[in-house]
């Protein structure tokens, strides 16, 4: 990862967190740039939330260094760090009104009454909660609570905003709206947002860069495009979007021997004998009859039998059984007459560079 | 409904009948609850409500010359006698000791309840059992245990004498009474506090720390207000029995520190002034009831 020359907003070097015998975060190096919308993505228990909590100061690393704008955090408590958190399920103070919730941080910092009042009002307007100042959290909808949580954190003008699954509790439509709002807000404020999610679609649509985590380890950091198109290993390829993973062994630099003995061409990037998987995105494959395979793609094709065809409006999803595996192929809709039908022999081929070879 | 021509009619009838069915169902549900609660109702009526009513009625009766009670010539004499100096002294002393007891219980219990509520389930249960263990021994016996410990021949005095601090004279002082009351009622404070603290989402405290609150501010602004229902409930559960306590003050306080409970008993058993004792009891009960209602309302608001 090419680190930015300016000081990173957050920098983790060799950070490990153990809870007893459990290694929650395993030797992570990570630099988050100032003004970046950064997502930490992974299944539950992958260590993403623990990493976020360490940045917030709610946990301390067992080993390693954690810096915020060049300052070593060590065991500095959360109230002395220039970051604020939007908690999962918001953790709004139930005994305080919207206004009291939002102004809490300013009051704790001992800011003057007039300054507190004006900044609180500005933030309440910003998140469009004007007129609801006196309500208690339990009188608000999920989306409104979410906004209070945002305002409560942002009113302090943190250098980095941490968000722990902020949209997890919202229904789909609201979630999509809030995704846009968050993105707009982040661009306007120019503050780094570090955002934890298990929803890969959310991460892909919102973030400048994504860190994919699994079992406490950082597997890949990169833009949505990099991660989707050039996954660094099998887990990332499988976790991000949908893909067909075809097991095989590297024969030489340009050839993989698949499990059924057939040879396909691909840029392997691994030494001969390495067992790998070839990742083929459903939309990256072409489908046709065996005779349709272009001569140039003879070594980047597979032939099997159609088992299922699903109509999705804009696309058709074919499932094709090839000897030992089943492939999913997404192709533009064609008229019913031209469609391959279940039971028919079908071939798929792909551009060589779209096949990504990943090791375990 | 064998005739198909009447199908529409019967459908209408069913639609009309629905609210009635609901009403029947409601009534049955209510009655079911009533039957289940009946034993408790009967018990409370016979052993609580009726005796209470008798006490109340007696407070308006007249004490005759021989120390008996005449259930005639109803008057308010007993209530007038409540203004006496001795009564006031006993009342003030009782309230002061009950307040002191409640405050000490609260101060001791809060950190303990917080500690308990933030442990693992196993440790928690173990600690809960430990809090309950004293209940396995009779209250009277435990008070006599303190009597022995605090007495001039007791282990406490022996220790201070050996060390060279001289004889301790705790027994038959107000300190001994407060000590006994705190000891006896501590679990009544710990349990409701524990229950209310345990319910508080720990992330609220994290959120407050994240929003620049120090540990003390976090306690004052978040933990304390959110645990207020437990504080209110625990305080009531300690204050009320402390105010009317009988066994502990009598055993550990001796004659010099008569409290309300002991004073009332004296009216019934020694002074043989039942109407006065009954009036004292009634007033005490009404004050406590009033205080409880006010306190609970206030506690409910801070929620």
Image (cartoon, helix red, strand yellow):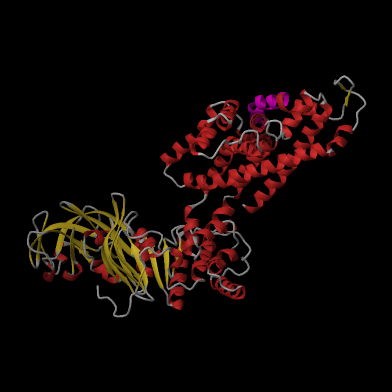
Residue A307: give x, y in percent of width and height: 24, 52
Q: Main secondary structure of the magenta part?
A: helix
Q: Say if residue A334 shows up in the picture.
A: no
Quarter of the image for the C terminus of chain A: give it.
Answer: bottom left
Residue drawn at point x = 45 percent, y = 70 percent: A182
In terms of depth relative to the viewer, which is nearer, B148 or B224?
A: B148
Residue A180: give x, y in percent of width and height: 45, 70
Q: Is residue A147 left or right of residue A251?
A: right
In terms of depth relative to the viewer, which is nearer, B34 or B10?
A: B34
Q: Which residues are magenta?
A: B29-46
Residue drawn at point x = 86 percent, y = 35 percent: B81
Residue drawn at point x = 21 percent, y = 59 percent: A234
Compared with A161, A328 (above or below) is above
Residue A242: give x, y in percent of width and height: 28, 60
Is B127 included in the stretch rendered in magenta? no
In terms of depth relative to the viewer, which is nearer, A40 or B223?
A: B223
Is B34 included in the stretch rendered in magenta? yes
Q: Say if residue B171 shows up in the picture.
A: yes
């Amino acid at each position: 990862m090419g680190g930015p020359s300016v000081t990173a907003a957050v920098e983790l070097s060799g950070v490990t967190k153990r809870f007893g015998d459990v290694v929650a975060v395993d030797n992570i190096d990570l630099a988050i740039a100032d003004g970046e919308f950064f997502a930490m993505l992974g299944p539950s228990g992958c260590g993403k939330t623990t990493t976020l909590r360490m940045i917030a100061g709610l946990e301390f690393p067992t080993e390693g260094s954690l810096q915020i704008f060049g300052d070593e955090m060590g065991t500095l408590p959360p109230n002395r760090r220039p970051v604020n958190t939007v908690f999962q399920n918001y953790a709004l103070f139930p005994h305080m009104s919207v206004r009291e919730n939002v102004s809490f941080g300013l009051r704790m910092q001992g800011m003057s009454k007039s300054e507190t009042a004006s900044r609180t009002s500005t933030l309440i307007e910003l998140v469009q909660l004007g007129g609801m100042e006196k309500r208690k959290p339990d009188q608000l909808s999920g989306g409104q609570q979410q906004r209070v949580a945002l305002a409560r954190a942002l009113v302090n003008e943190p250098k980095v905003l941490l968000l722990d699954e902020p949209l997890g509790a919202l229904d789909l439509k609201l979630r999509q709206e809030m995704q846009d709002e968050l993105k707009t807000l982040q661009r306007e404020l120019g503050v780094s947002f570090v955002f934890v999610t298990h929803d890969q679609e959310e991460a892909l649509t919102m973030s400048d860069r994504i860190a994919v985590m699994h079992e406490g380890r950082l597997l890949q950091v990169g833009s949505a495009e990099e991660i989707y198109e050039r996954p660094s290993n099998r887990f990332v390829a499988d976790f991000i979007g949908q893909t067909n993973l075809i097991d095989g062994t590297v024969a030489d630099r340009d050839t993989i021997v698949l499990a059924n003995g057939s040879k396909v061409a691909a840029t392997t990037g691994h030494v001969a004998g390495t067992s790998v998987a070839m990742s083929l995105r459903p939309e990256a494959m072409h489908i046709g009859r065996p005779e349709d395979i272009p001569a140039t793609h003879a070594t980047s094709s597979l032939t099997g039998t159609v088992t299922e065809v699903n109509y999705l409006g804009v696309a058709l999803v074919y499932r094709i059984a090839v000897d030992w595996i089943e492939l999913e192929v997404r192709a533009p809709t064609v008229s019913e007459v031209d469609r391959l039908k279940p039971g028919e022999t079908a071939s798929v081929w792909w551009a060589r560079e779209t096949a990504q070879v990943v090791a375990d | 409904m064998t005739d198909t021509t009447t199908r529409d009619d019967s459908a209408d009838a069913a639609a009309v009948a629905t609210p009635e069915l609901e009403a029947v169902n409601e009534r049955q549900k209510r009655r079911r609850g009533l039957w289940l609660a009946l034993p408790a109702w009967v018990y409370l009526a016979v052993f609580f409500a009726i005796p209470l009513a008798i006490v109340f009625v007696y407070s308006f009766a007249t004490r005759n010359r021989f120390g008996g009670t005449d259930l005639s010539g109803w008057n308010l004499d007993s209530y007038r006698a409540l203004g006496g100096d001795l009564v006031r002294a006993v009342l003030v002393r009782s309230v002061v000791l009950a307040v002191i007891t409640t405050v000490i219980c609260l101060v001791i219990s809060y950190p303990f309840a917080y500690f308990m509520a933030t442990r693992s389930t196993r440790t928690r249960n173990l600690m809960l059992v430990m809090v309950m263990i004293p209940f396995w021994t009779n209250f009277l016996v435990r008070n006599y245990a303190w009597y022995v410990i605090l007495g001039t021949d007791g282990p406490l005095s022996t220790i201070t004498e050996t060390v060279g601090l001289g004889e301790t004279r705790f027994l038959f002082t107000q300190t001994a009474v407060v000590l006994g009351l705190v000891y006896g009622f501590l679990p009544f404070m710990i349990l409701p506090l524990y229950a209310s603290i345990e319910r508080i989402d720990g992330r609220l405290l994290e959120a407050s720390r994240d929003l620049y609150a120090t540990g003390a501010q976090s306690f004052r602004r978040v933990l304390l207000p959110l645990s207020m229902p437990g504080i209110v409930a625990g305080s009531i559960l300690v204050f009320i029995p402390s105010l009317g306590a009988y066994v502990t003050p009598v055993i550990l306080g001796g004659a010099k520190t008569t409290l309300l409970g002991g004073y009332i008993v004296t009216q019934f058993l020694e002074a043989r002034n039942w109407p006065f004792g009954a009036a004292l009891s009634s007033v005490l009960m009404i004050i406590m009831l009033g205080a409880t209602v006010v306190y609970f309302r206030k506690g409910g608001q801070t929620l």
